[in-house]
Amino acid sequence: MSTTQPPTAIPNFIGGSWTRSQASECLEVRNPATAELLGYTPLSGAEDVDRAVRAAREAFPDWRSTPAIERARVLFRLKALLEREKPELAKSLTREHGKTLSESLGEIQRGIENVEHACGIPTLMMGDTLEDIAPGIDCETIRQPLGVFAVITPYNFPVMIPLWFWPYAVATGNTVVLKPSEQDPLTHQLVVELAVEAGLPPGVLNVVHGAREAVSAILEHPDIKGVSFVGSSETARFIYAKAAEHGKRVQALGGAKNHIIVLPDADLDLTTNAVVSSLFGSAGQRCLAGSVVVGVGEAYRPMRERLLDAASSLRLGYGLEEDADMGPVISRRHRERVIGYIHAGEQEGARLLLDGRGARVERYPEGNWIGPTVFEDVTPEMTIGKEEIFGPVAGIARASSLEAALSLVHRSRYGNAVSLFTTSGKAAREFRYRAGISMIGINIGVVAPMAFFPFGGSRGSFYGDLKAQGKDAIEFYTDKRVVISRW
Ligand code: NAD
């Protein structure tokens, strides 16, 4: 719910200064476990976005001509500072997002790895050369930055996902306007402070807080050359179309409905641990979370029993306390949405084996708690079989063969990640050949590519060509210019 912006609302960061937003309205940021009020996000509009873009545009010429090795040194210093501050960043992240402390530490580590990878920019950004493309004529490609990029990010990894993008954008010599999620923007403010301490010059990274209005202003701004976006599929598709209409490069990563297939020859101990952590880690609020587990043939029964056992023993709690295996979901509104899906599953005929709706944590009665929830007999036609729930709600389904299981995967509109559990190399090869999904796990429950590999899905989970991280990031943030010369 929005309220009038108080003086304590978090500031934007424009041209190297912390600046009060021009917004009149703001949103409360609350700890999802304790309901404690942590801050206010101003709902900035076009005026703030324009100021940030101007600052970024002014900073571009000097930053672009700063030697790549010097730009990399800033990132080296940032990496060291992020490591120094990791424990404090993790606490802040758990407070505003709700994930457990170990999940927060894992997220920050994955973010640091992107900074680390972007430090290789002097090599990563090199072009190609060929002499004598015709007698006495040489040809080379050089990679050049384009100017100002915008980065728009979701709530579920508020430290890591901005770091999938802006370190590469600035390493390649561009400048950036970041619009973080309005739901949990606080920890990334600390990351920006560290970037300043690392020596990132004013205007190279700017932050504008807000929601739809700020995004619209970004999409329409003539001086923004490209947009990196992560969020739900509906928004990703809109961003892709709108930004393209305004002549921008776009990479828009969307939502997911990931299947996990278990074959009868799978190692059940390894499988159960991996599957349960995929389904319920971060309370199911990961784009790589497993959502439907398909037991093939005789795998079904034992998998069902073990999964239920493990899921019912997970302890809900405040992520800063040691006994918590799973935290709350982000907001009261999101809790209601997830609970709506559980009702829909019951109404559409799925069998509820474990019901998390009544879950409570006594010490924190105001938290947005939902316990692990498991449905059986989930089909692709059901709402819970086809839509992204983004909470701790798992469906299990049966299939007679790998072929039949893959046909369930292929009926989904999403295509982010898919996993197979097996001890058969032949089945694994067949699976990876035919899965048709971008991030493929074999005996891995959460298929998260590391910083030096591309991250992004297919079908309704991704709109664009070049993904996040890896070599794709360098491609996305640079233009290859071809020089042909004769002397
Ligand atoms: P969201 O789409 O609600 O918000 C993402 C960003 O878009 C936010 O910055 C928000 O302010 C902005 N936004 C939201 N609605 C908008 C609109 N109508 N117009 C313009 N801007 C808008 O997503 P979320 O709830 O913050 O995050 C969860 C979603 O992100 C899930 O669907 C999840 O699967 C997805 N996600 C995908 C990946 C991936 O790699 N594919 C990674 C993380 C999260």
Image (cartoon, rainbow, N blue to C red):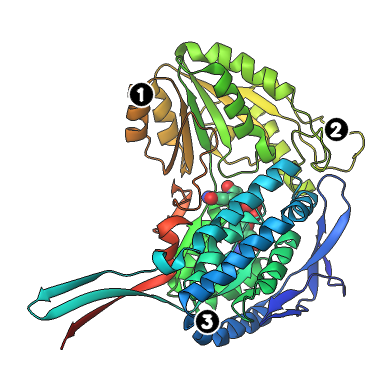
Task: Identify which amino acid the numbered label 2 is placed on.
Answer: Arg
Residue 263 spot, x, y in % from top left: 45, 19
Report which quarter residue 175 is drawn in.
bottom right
Query: CB atoms at circles 1 and 2 under 8 Å apart?
Result: no
Q: Residues within 10 Å of mark 1 (few under 14, many from 20)?
A: few
The residue that label 2 is drawn on is: 360
Of residue 398 and residue 428, the one placed in the foreground of this image is 428
Residue 481 spot, x, y in % from top left: 31, 76
The residue that label 3 is drawn on is: 63
Q: Which label belongs to residue 425?
A: 1
Residue furthest to the right in view is 363
Q: Residue at x 61, y 25 (%)?
A: 273
Q: Is residue 267 above or below residue 127?
A: above
Please report whichever mark, 2 or 3, sits nearer to the chain's N-terminal start: 3
Cα–Cα gap, marks 2 and 3:
52 Å
Specify whether 41 is left or right of 240. Answer: right
Q: Residue at x 73, y 66 (%)?
A: 189
From the viewer's perspective, is the residue at label 2 or at label 3 nearer?
A: 3
Q: Which label belongs to residue 150?
A: none
Report which quarter residue 422 is drawn in.
top left
Task: Identify which amino acid the numbered label 1 is placed on.
Answer: Gly
Q: Does residue 364 appear in this view? A: yes
Cα–Cα gap, marks 1 and 3:
50 Å
